[in-house]
């Protein structure tokens, strides 16, 4: 990969110039600007002159380039920004016979290094300079595109001319053969393209000057030889089939692209047109070959293709080329397998941020080199997808073992520190591996799976590889999809609340209900909170969602109260997520909701999971304490799962302990084991001594209910009484109670 070299110029730094004059129309400044533009054109002409195929002198080239330089300079400043002038400059280069690939490379080098330097304002702000740099990059792209397009058009035009002259030559040659030897000579020698005549056995009879020059200029190398001697290993298979058909008189002509060896052993690429010449009676007699030398054009095409498919920084194949390779691999037939390692460097951003981009670039180059040395076997390839993401691919029948080894080699190659700017940087990476048979999945799917798996490796701590498995992929994809769908779901009203009664263990009366949120997902159906609450926590959506749940259930509780005036105070329990605890609007929102619904604070109980309060400091407890002081009950949910310090309970503003379901369950599973019973007994008596009520969760049988009542628990919740359900079910239960 060649990086455009800096053209000869006046060293680094801003060109010497006077201090800026008053205004943009100031004649002195205009003069100065013109001078700088000329300087730019000089540098440009020096860079491209050696590679132009023109009869102009260097100063003439410079004069020719000056208006083009002006167009680039104008485009750099123009508002709105437009890249079309640069595109036209690319085309103008081709028109001026600057068709050598190097002319483009050198032009880009000059534009990159000097356009902004010479053509931007002298005292531009850094932001302005940044904008100029960005524009300059886009102008270079447009210039390359204009160059490539013009070259293509020129090639097409040449081909057309060739076809015309071929036709001409062919009729001329036929007439000449039929008439006079002199006429044939004239066509032969005058033609700009190579012409040769052979008999039907392939013996070469005549070749013209142009053809001889193309092959390296040795007459004896051509004449008296046979056409069939010019086999080249890169011949397409059908070339010689077409040849056979022609000499047997089965076809009149054919046209192919064909390589030859020149006399010096180098390769000549041609557009070859062969026509059958018949005698006056129509019998096949000779074959006439017309050849156009396409070697240069081919090289340019190869070069442009190389640049389009390789990463400019590291020289590795880029995403485009990798995709092509992967696609081909995945389309391969039976028995072929592939293994892909998707590597992302751990903490690369920190290197970039702390040491700067050029250090980051050098690090990437070193990493690329190391990676390349890991994948040298046939069927292996390494590519850079962008940023700090690389891939390594291995193909063959036994990639299952190979891909693990490859990933191991990669981590190993990264293990030794990389020295940059006198520091040893430790580079680590996370690798997602996908391995499997060809013919089942497309490249996009494989890459996505590898990407997901790489993230799994990263979240497991990095510096490791993980292997994709369909289930983990599906989970990640659903998780991803659900996370994205959450905000719209809240707007569309896809959430709803079920209520589960809280029952007095003493008399079995319904004492309140816990609000439990559900998501009625358009594709996945009803989802429980475990599927989406953690996602909502993660994205922050839990705050508006939690507020909605609070509002909705408080309103519901008020509604029950109005309908059911003769019972005791009915309570509503609402779960609070840890993130809601940290939200500054918690107290004011809650007060607001209660006031608007007209529900007294004493009817609300907020459930906070035990783990969220372990180690909570006073700042975190303050809003809860404020709410408790207003009369809102705070319950410690899932108690017993978080190993909180029992002595700590006194510090917390809670009035209810909700014993986790696991206690109820283990008492059920080991009824004879008195340890569980003793623990519950202990907790209950401790809670009571601290003035806390005890609610038990997950009561599923009458026996459990009886035992827990015995142990002194106050309230219970569970399927034994009712599963979570629609709000009117609670109403029915309340009525039943009243009866
Ligand atoms: P939680 O607050 O501990 O809620 C009790 C869970 O136990 C509920 O699960 C309930 O359906 C289930 N359950 C009740 N009785 C029984 C029983 O007898 N046997 C069994 N096996 N399970 C029973 P659910 O509805 O899946 O809720 C799970 C968790 O999601 C809740 O645990 C709570 O932490 C959270 N959650 C629910 N709604 C909300 C909400 O609006 N906001 C927040 N932040 N979290 C919520
Ligand atoms: Mg709860
Ligand atoms: Mg609970």
Image (cartoon, rainbow, N blue to C red):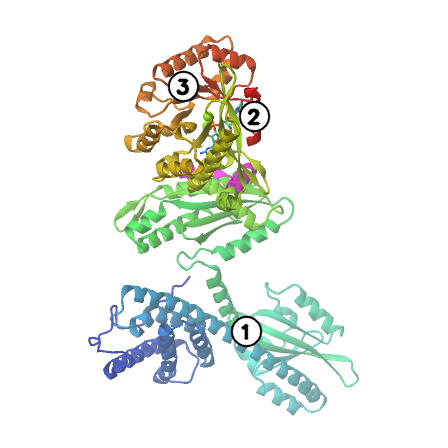
Distance from label 2 to label 3 (Cα)?
Answer: 22 Å
- Depth-wise, is mark 3 or mark 1 nearer the camera? 3
x 62%, y 45%: residue: 440
Report the front residue among 33 and 568: 568
Q: Which residue is mark 1?
A: 294
Q: Is residue 509 above or below residue 576?
A: above
User: Is residue 220 visible to the viewer in this orientation of the structure?
Assistant: no
- Disc 2 element: loop
Q: Is residue 83 above or below residue 651?
A: below
The quadrant of the image that shows the N terminus is bottom left
Residue 472, magenta (yes or no) = yes
Residue 542, magenta (yes or no) = no
- Depth-wise, is mark 2 or mark 3 nearer the camera? 3
Q: Is mark 2 within 8 Å of ligand 1?
A: yes
In the image as oriented, which residue stretches furthest toward the right?
281
Mark number for residue 349?
none
x 72%, y 73%: residue: 246
For the residues labelled 2 and 1, say whether their Cβ atoms are less than 8 Å apart.
Answer: no
Mark number for residue 723?
2
x 28%, y 45%: residue: 424
Q: Quadrant of residue 200?
A: bottom right
Give coordinates of residue 455: x percent, y percent: 45, 42
Report the front residue among 16 and 535: 535
């Amino acid at each position: 990969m060649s990086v455009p070299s800096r053209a000869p110029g006046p060293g680094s730094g801003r060109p010497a110039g006077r201090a800026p004059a008053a205004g943009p129309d100031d004649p002195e400044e205009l003069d100065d600007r013109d001078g700088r533009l000329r300087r730019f054109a000089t540098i440009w002409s020096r860079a491209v002159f050696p590679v132009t195929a023109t009869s102009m002198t260097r100063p003439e080239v410079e004069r020719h380039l000056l208006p083009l330089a002006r167009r680039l300079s104008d485009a750099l400043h123009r508002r709105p920004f437009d890249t079309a002038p640069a595109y036209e400059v690319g085309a103008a280069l081709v028109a001026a016979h600057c068709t050598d690939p190097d002319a483009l490379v050198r032009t880009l080098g000059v534009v990159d290094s000097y356009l902004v330097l010479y053509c931007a304002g002298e005292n531009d702000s850094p932001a302005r300079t940044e904008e100029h740099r960005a524009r300059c990059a886009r102008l270079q792209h447009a210039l390359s595109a204009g160059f490539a397009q013009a070259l293509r058009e020129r090639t097409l035009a040449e081909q057309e001319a060739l076809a015309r002259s071929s036709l001409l030559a062919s009729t001329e040659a036929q007439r000449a053969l039929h008439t006079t030897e002199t006429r044939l000579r004239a066509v032969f020698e005058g033609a700009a393209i190579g012409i040769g005549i052979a008999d039907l056995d392939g013996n070469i009879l005549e070749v013209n000057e142009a053809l001889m020059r193309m092959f390296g200029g040795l007459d004896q190398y051509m004449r008296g030889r046979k056409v069939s001697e010019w086999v080249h290993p890169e011949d397409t298979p059908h070339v010689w089939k077409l040849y056979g058909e022609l000499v047997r008189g089965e076809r009149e002509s054919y046209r192919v692209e064909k390589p030859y060896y020149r006399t010096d052993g180098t390769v000549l690429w041609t557009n070859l047109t062969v026509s059958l010449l018949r005698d006056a009676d129509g019998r096949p007699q000779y074959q006439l070959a017309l050849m156009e030398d396409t070697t240069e054009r081919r090289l340019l095409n190869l070069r442009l293709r190389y640049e389009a498919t390789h990463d400019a920084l590291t020289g590795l194949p880029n995403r485009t080329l990798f995709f092509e390779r992967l696609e081909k691999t995945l389309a391969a037939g039976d028995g072929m397998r592939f293994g892909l390692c998707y590597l992302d460097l751990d903490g690369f951003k920190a290197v970039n941020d702390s040491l700067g981009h050029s250090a980051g670039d050098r690090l990437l180059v070193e990493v690329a080199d190391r990676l390349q040395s890991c994948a040298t076997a046939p069927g292996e390839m390494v590519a850079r997808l962008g940023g700090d993401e690389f891939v390594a691919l291995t193909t063959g029948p036994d990639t299952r073992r190979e891909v693990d080894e490859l990933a191991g080699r990669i981590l190993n190659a990264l293990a030794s520190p990389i020295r940059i700017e006198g520091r040893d940087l430790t580079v680590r990476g996370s690798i997602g591996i996908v391995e499997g048979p060809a013919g089942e999945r497309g490249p996009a799917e494989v890459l996505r799976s590898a990407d997901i798996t790489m993230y799994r490796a990263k979240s497991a701590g990095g510096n490791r590889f993980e292997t994709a498995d369909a289930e983990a992929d599906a989970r990640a994809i659903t998780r991803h999809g659900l996370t994205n769908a959450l905000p719209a779901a809240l707007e569309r009203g896809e959430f709803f609340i079920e209520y589960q009664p809280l029952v007095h263990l003493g008399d079995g009366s319904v004492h309140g209900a816990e609000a439990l949120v559900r998501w009625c997902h358009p594709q996945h159906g009803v989802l429980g909170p475990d599927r989406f609450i953690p996602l909502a926590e993660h994205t922050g959506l839990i705050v508006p969602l939690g507020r909605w749940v609070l509002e909705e259930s408080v309103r519901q509780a008020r509604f029950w109260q109005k309908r059911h005036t003769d019972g005791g105070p009915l309570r509503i329990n609402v779960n609070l997520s840890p993130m809601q605890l940290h939200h500054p609007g918690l107290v004011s929102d809650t007060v607001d909701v209660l006031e608007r619904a007209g529900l007294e604070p004493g009817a609300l109980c907020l459930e906070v999971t035990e783990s969220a309060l372990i180690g909570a400091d006073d700042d975190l407890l303050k809003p809860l304490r404020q709410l408790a002081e207003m009369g809102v009950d705070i319950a410690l949910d899932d108690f017993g799962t978080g190993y909180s310090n029992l002595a700590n309970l006194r510090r917390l503003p809670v009035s209810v302990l909700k014993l986790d379901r696991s206690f109820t369950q283990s008492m059920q599973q080991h009824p004879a084991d008195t340890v569980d019973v003793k623990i519950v007994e202990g907790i209950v008596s401790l809670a009571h001594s601290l003035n806390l009520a005890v609610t038990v969760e997950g009561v599923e049988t009458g026996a459990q209910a009886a035992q827990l009542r015995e142990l002194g628990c106050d309230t219970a919740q569970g399927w034994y009484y009712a599963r979570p359900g629609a709000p009117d079910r609670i109403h029915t239960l309340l009525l039943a109670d009243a009866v």
